[in-house]
Image (cartoon, rainbow, N blue to C red):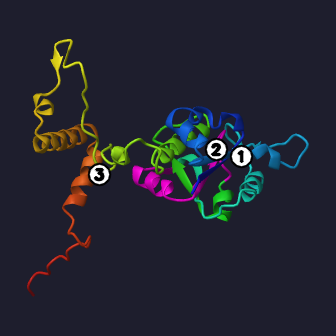
Amino acid sequence: MTFAATILTLYPEMFPGPLGHSIAGRAMAEGKWACETVQIRDFAEDKHRTVDDTPAGGGAGMVLKCDVLARALDSAPAAGRPILAMTPRGKPITQARIRELAQGPGVIILCGRFEGFDERLFEARPEIEQVSLADIVLSGGEMAALTILDACIRLLPGVMGAPSSGAEESYENGLLEYPHYTRPLEWEGRTIPEVLRSGDHAKIAAWRKLQSENDTRLRRPDLWERHEGARVQPASGARQKRKEPDQ
């Protein structure tokens, strides 16, 4: 099955862009994924091909028009594919969601620009999933769309060299990945940790687990808190009821 990506954008020339190179480019050449773009401006109905207008209530910038966006979106059949709208007002995407997307038939991505979307688009099309890349603001959704596609493509069957390549990575188990080393053995007075040269796989696994936990706790306390919370939950996932005091 080919992972089919449709990108609705004012700048179709940005795709596939960097995704036409390296492992994503090879995967595209091998037919593992395909990318098509839809020029939003083609669905404007005035002679100036207008896609935006001033914000209701006043304010700076311009807002993408809901009628134009809806026509562009309706031109791309979903065929079971989720629809993502790239906006800093959206829910931050996670590796777990990326993995879900990669296991499906593909994705439709709507790229925002200017001050964003007319909110009525989301009211009329509730199936649209509003997504942000991180707590940052970009000049448009295209760069975020490229990043999300790259994250999905590398997880497609046969794209990465080893099937296990995507298993021991940051966020896959709720933690940051452990640090890596390679030759030379010594560099600028620094050596590869002795445990990694021991050949003792049990000790190496324990060291890596400890490093992963320590780095997560220090660098991403938010991830560590969620990880610890998940770890102490009962196996059934159900919360234990509080015992009522004796009457």
The reply to whether dot 2 and dot 1 touch (C-beta < 8 Å) is yes
Q: Name the amino acid type tagged 1.
A: Leu
Q: Which residue is mark 1?
A: 64
Check the image and name the residue furthest to the left.
246
- The CA distance from mark 2 to mark 3 is 31 Å
Give me the residue at 14% from left, 42% from top: 201
Give percent across and percent down for residue 180. 26, 31
| Residue at the (24%, 38%) spot, across then down | 178
Q: Which residues are magenta?
A: 90-118
Q: In 3D space, how far apart are the residues under numbered discs 2 and 1 (Cα atoms)?
A: 8 Å
Image coordinates for residue 158, horizontal then vertical, percent: 46, 47
Residue ID at (71%, 40%): 62
The secondary structure type at the circle numbered 2 is: loop
Horizontally, residue 43 falls left or right of residue 101, namely: right
State the quadrant of the N terminus: bottom right
Tell which of 151 and 60 is nearer to you. Answer: 151
Quadrant where the C terminus lies?
Answer: bottom left
Query: Mark 2 or mark 3: which is in front?
Result: 3
**Quadrant housing residue 229:** bottom left
Crowdedness near tag 3: few (<14), some (14–19) or many (≥20) residues, C-alpha within 10 Å: few
Mark linked to residue 23: none
> Which residue type carries mark 3?
Asn
**In the rendered structure, which disc, 2 or 1, sits on the residue that comes first in sequence?**
1
The residue to which callout 3 is attached is: 173
Q: In the rendering, at what x and y percent does residue 46 appear?
A: 89, 46
Q: Residue furthest front?
A: 30
Q: Write down the residue under mark 2.
A: 112
Between discs 3 and 1, the one toward the N terminus:
1
Distance Cα–Cα, label 3 vs label 1? 38 Å
Mark 2: few, some, or many residues within 10 Å (few <14, many ≥20)? many
Whether residue 58 appears in magenta in the rendering, the answer is no
Query: In front: mark 2 or mark 1?
Result: 2
